[in-house]
Image: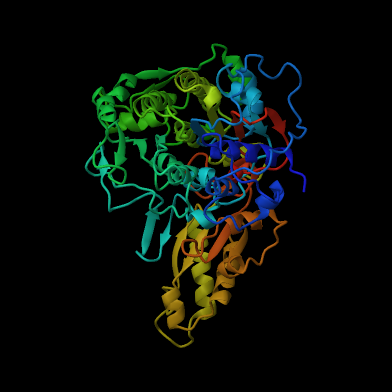
Amino acid sequence: MQATPGWYHARTFIVNLCQRDGIMPVAIGREISLMSLLRSRLRRCASLCLSLLLVCATWGSAQPSRPQSNRPAAGQASAARSTPASTTVRPRLVLLIVVDQFREDYFNRFGDLFGQNGLRRLLNEGAWWVNTNFDHMPTETAPGHATLLTGAWPAETGIVGNTWYERESGKRVDNSEDTSVKILGGAGDERGASPRRLLASTLGDELRLHTAGRAKVIGISAKDRGAIMPAGRHANAAYWFSANTGRIISSTYYFNGLPAWVQQFNEAKPSDKFFGAKWERLLKDEREYVRRAGPDAAEWENTPTDKNITFPHTIDGGASAPNRQFYDDLTGSPYSNDLLVEFAKLAITNENLGADADTDVLSVSFSANDYVGHRFGPYSQEVMDITLRTDRQIGELLDFVDQRVGLRNTVVAFSSDHGVAPIPEHAARLNLPGARIDPNGIMTAVKNAVKARFAKPGEDKDTTADYVQEFTPKTGNVYLNWAALKRDRIDREEIERVAGEAALTVPGVARYFTRTQLEREAISPADPIARRALHGFNAQRSGDVVLIYQPFHLIVTYTADHSSPYSYDTHVPLLLMGAGVAAGRYTEAATPADL
């Protein structure tokens, strides 16, 4: 089978990672098409990429010839591109850059305003897959970050949402919460966090195994999950921002105390320099914002919690001095991304990342874009402005990596964890079916239907009262009480159907899938919604009925949100730049799991 261009580049990228001291990995005897990878549910814990890392030993044949690619037109590629390193030299650093809630269409809307050294450099000098969609649901931060460097769906990573109902403890749990560890550098009331709930290995985990622990792996983000999930279970460290203290923190999962350089960074109180900062538009011409993003004061942005909806935004949290309110305000501004870039540069320097022949991994996830997107929506001047600013911040980081490590010695990957839906009220104004769903209405309908079907006639006590155990509205998971169903000998397949049909009576609910369907894989792979539901289903952690909402419908109180299997939430960027990666624009279907 002839390899597609997309398959070739992904394969070459990891082949380069596997090289060490001039030794190439064993050739794969059978090529697998990109589409078969997309449709395969057998990505157990490690993607094809990680599998190649495990078979690094000897190389028995030459690399395949480079296929034809639909490269950019002449003049689009950068003439200043540095000479690529030899393909027999293993990259010293893998840099994953994630922008939380970055839709692919932002390239089309704002790309001509990018600077030369940031995203435009990746677009011109890297491989760009323009038709990249997450092939799972829910499209949330934790599942997306977990997929990026494991190459596995939530079905395998176990990260089925930002939160889910844990049957063993009988409560909702957060993806990274861990009461067995303590926070380092934060406030006393902050819960511990670790990757213990992540069931799959990451690229960094495999590199650490491959190098007997010599490779260094570090994750950085404003969010704990944005730092923890890409770094993996065997990482040297994950660092995130504490909105309680304004410091960069970690947990005792990684070490007993913060490294001296991190403590020194925190002692300087770097967050406080942004107190009272005015977030102004980056571009001086406001008409450019109006043309691309509409008026600044859109009525659908005006929610009770977001009073300051127009530029300039004063970053102070309404406080007279730096405190928790200010630090929380800071996370939703472009200045928290500045803080991350500053910290990432210190991490590269103090941890000597990319300084030797063992490939290190650094993931940097910019979270502020997500907070801004939730507040103002994707068609806002604020989202436009923070996108332009993030481009410059990425350029600053890439310039530093070039000076310190050399981009010719680095493989850079760029993607996002999910997109975002239009604000429902905005969608409705455009005659799209935008609306908000009442989660209480779903629970009422389900419980009433279950009672009507399974209540025992003549009994005063409602024996069905405990049949429906939990509902997680955003992910659409209805959890049934298995012990109660067993006690009363209720057929689980039937009650799943009853609950699903009842939910369909609520306006805004479009479809449902039952546990029985998903465990049997009784869905059509050609149905993208069904396939994404299957890829997001973990038998131990998911519910018994999975609801799919109508397009442009939200079930949360955020101004804007994401979680659906629709393209506005799934379509994200995927770019690779580095040795062995031929620059080009590729239109074949891809997914971040193929990274």
- 527 or 420: which is nearer to us? 527
Q: How many marks?
A: 0
* Colouring style: rainbow
- 303 or 85: which is nearer to us? 85
| Residue at the bottom extreme, as displayed | 458
Res 292 seen here:
no
| Residue at the top extreme, as displayed | 284
Q: Is residue 67 left or right of residue 12?
A: right
- Eyeballing the image, is 163 above or below 425? below
Q: Is residue 281 left or right of residue 517?
A: left
Residue 588: x percent and y percent? Answer: 73, 40
Residue 104: x percent and y percent? Answer: 63, 34
Kindly identify the residue that appears in the image at 42 percent across and 82 percent down: 487
- Eyeballing the image, is 261 above or below 17? above
- 377 or 178: which is nearer to us? 178
Kindly identify the residue that appears in the image at 65 percent across and 54 percent down: 529
Q: Is residue 242 left or right of residue 391?
A: left
Residue 27: x percent and y percent? Answer: 65, 46
- 437 or 276: which is nearer to us? 276
Q: Is residue 502 left or right of residue 322?
A: right
Image quadrant for the C terminus?
A: top right
- Eyeballing the image, is 388 above or below 94? above
- The quarter holding residue 261 reads top left
Residue 121: x percent and y percent? Answer: 60, 21
- The quarter holding residue 571 reads top right
Res 546 seen here:
yes
